[in-house]
Image (cartoon, rainbow, N blue to C red):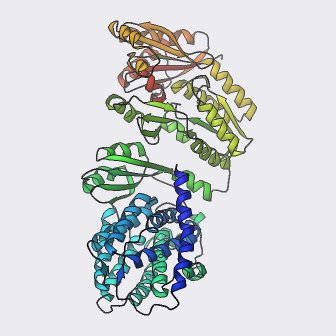
Amino acid sequence: MIHAVDNRINIVINQIGLHIRHMNKFKNMKMKKIRYLDGKRLRNAILASTTLISRMQNHLNKINVFPVADGDTGTNMAHTMKHIASRLFKLRDRSISEVSNELAKSALMGAQGNSGAILAQFFHGFAEGAKGKWRLTTSAFASAVQRAKQTSFEALSEPRDGTILTVIDDWANYIEDAATKTEDFVELLKKGLKRAKQSLADTPKKLEVLKKAGVVDAGAQGFVHILEGIVHFIEQGKLEKISALDEDKLSPESNVNVREIDSDIKFRFCTECMITAQEIDRSKLREALRTMGDSLIVAGGSERVRIHIHTNTPDTVFATSSAFGDILERKVDDMVIQHQSIYSEHKIGKIGIVTDSSCDLPDHFIEDNDIHIIPVKLIFGDEVYRDKVEISPVEFYEKLLTSPFHPTTSQPAVADALSIYEHAIQHYDEIISIHLPRASSGTLQTIEKAVQMSGSKNIHCIDGKGISAALGLVVMEAVQAVKDGLNVDQIKEKVLKATENVKIFIMLPTLKYLVKGGRVSKPKGLIGKILNLKPLVSFDSDGRVALISKAFNEKAALNKIVAMTKAHCRSYGRAKFIVAHANAYEKAQWCVEQLRSILNISDDIPIVEAAPVLGVHAGPGTVGIAVIGYDD
């Protein structure tokens, strides 16, 4: 669907050129003076800016170092402007009010990234300033620009000097002053562009990171390109000559040294979403999100708001935002991966590890060992979430209790898997990829398709034969094998051995969610409820769910899974454990204490939140003990 929309936008952009050539058959003279700006002129000026931004996006990506050197400012600004152009292209209204209103709406809907969100808010403010007007004089234009500047600053929680906001501020202030001295838009905008370029050239003096990299601010440069496009049209009265503009005259020469910039990214995920409601309190929304990261932008009006934030907890951002209205769309980009993909020229190691979000491991272990996670999809009615990216386990279990829809799971998107592999293979010679059992899910089949599409012969997929903490223990074995210096074949052998030696014993507090998911019939579910039945399940050697026992109260059920864990350990010289739970930390802690006491364990036993893939069928209150045995 997304690709189809992008294709339609590109088709419209191509049509702009045909429209421009046709229009210019009737324009043989340069416009000398322009004393008003109406909707038609604004529309064509924005189309000119879109063409120019599209041409310059690679340069903008190249100089992108602030707030994060993730190389996407040009892409984001071009995407935002193309979306605007696709809506304005067919608009024939000559009212400045109507055109600027459509400009603001389309900018908000298509905004992408930090710079795109700021542009959306700028255009939103301009539309407020032009509201109800057929055309603008230079003085009225200056007032609308001041409103655009004001709302741009209001959108950011912590505006920084030396960025796009600085150039907007300097340009808007010049326009306000110069508008009192001229009624000619050609003169006003040409001189205003000159002031904006001066402000742009000064950005490295105001941000040390820009000075160190030898660049101007990429977002500010993009805004100047927009002004250049506008001035070109206003001065020439034509759009077609945009393609002939000399890029060397558009972009300041820079001794670009981006690779020397510190790549320590404090907040990893560039997170965006759109919220709609009858009345949105943007101030309260901004305050609710303020402590969750940086680069926070809350753009839009009272009924539709776009959020942009850099955070380590995108799922929490979405959950908090949902309290203010309906979330129409979500977008999460891993800026660490983006930065490494663009600027890293060396391998991190010989062998990397990939798994999926059904695997439960402590967060620090995942990060310390650079384990790549492919997100499984979770579906509540029409809402689709990427597991552990757009919704956390805690939030999933809360939603499970309150949503009118029982969730389902779906294999990862091929695009998500392919993106993970394309990044990982840049930094490792070989990849070991361990996943949900083929017998229980289509995830492994989807992932194998992504591997095939990647064209790499160095990605090795393995059936993990379990989920949750059991899969986590298998992945731990792969990590240790890499640390021990084993080769790919030896690691694969060790992982396969681990799948044979690992077990997970899961206590379900109710049959309710098995009934909702269609795994147990309603009559059997009713009998189980009457008897207070607590099923105990595990996975067989093929990775299929198997009922292994039952109990008639929760204490007995917990004692049984501890006893089963103890029995499994008798066949081995030593063992390792992980305890997983679904909103049942106290039960998990009790199991840990029992294991320590009965088996005389002094080593740490991690407690983790159970993967929603398990929770869909098991429900809140579930506890599982995963154990892997060793012969030595």
x and y, in percent, of residue 396 in the image: 39, 33
In this picture, residue 62 sits left or right of residue 103:
right
* Residue at figure coordinates x 28%, y 90% from the top left: 180
Q: Quadrant of the C terminus?
A: top right
x and y, in percent, of residue 25 in the image: 55, 84
x and y, in percent, of residue 293 in the image: 39, 52
Q: Quadrant of residue 60?
A: bottom right
Compared to residue 522, the image places residue 435 above or below, namely: below
In this picture, residue 204 sits left or right of residue 466:
left
Compared to residue 37, the image places residue 548 above or below, namely: above
The foreground one among 43 and 289 is 43
x and y, in percent, of residue 140 in the image: 28, 81
Q: Is residue 608 visible?
A: yes
Q: Quadrant of residue 518?
A: top left
* Residue at figure coordinates x 41%, y 13% from the top left: 558
The foreground one among 583 and 85 is 85
* Residue at figure coordinates x 33%, y 60% from the top left: 300
Number of marks drawn: 0
Compared to residue 143, the image places residue 377 above or below, namely: above
Q: Is residue 261 visible?
A: no
The foreground one among 253 and 307 is 307
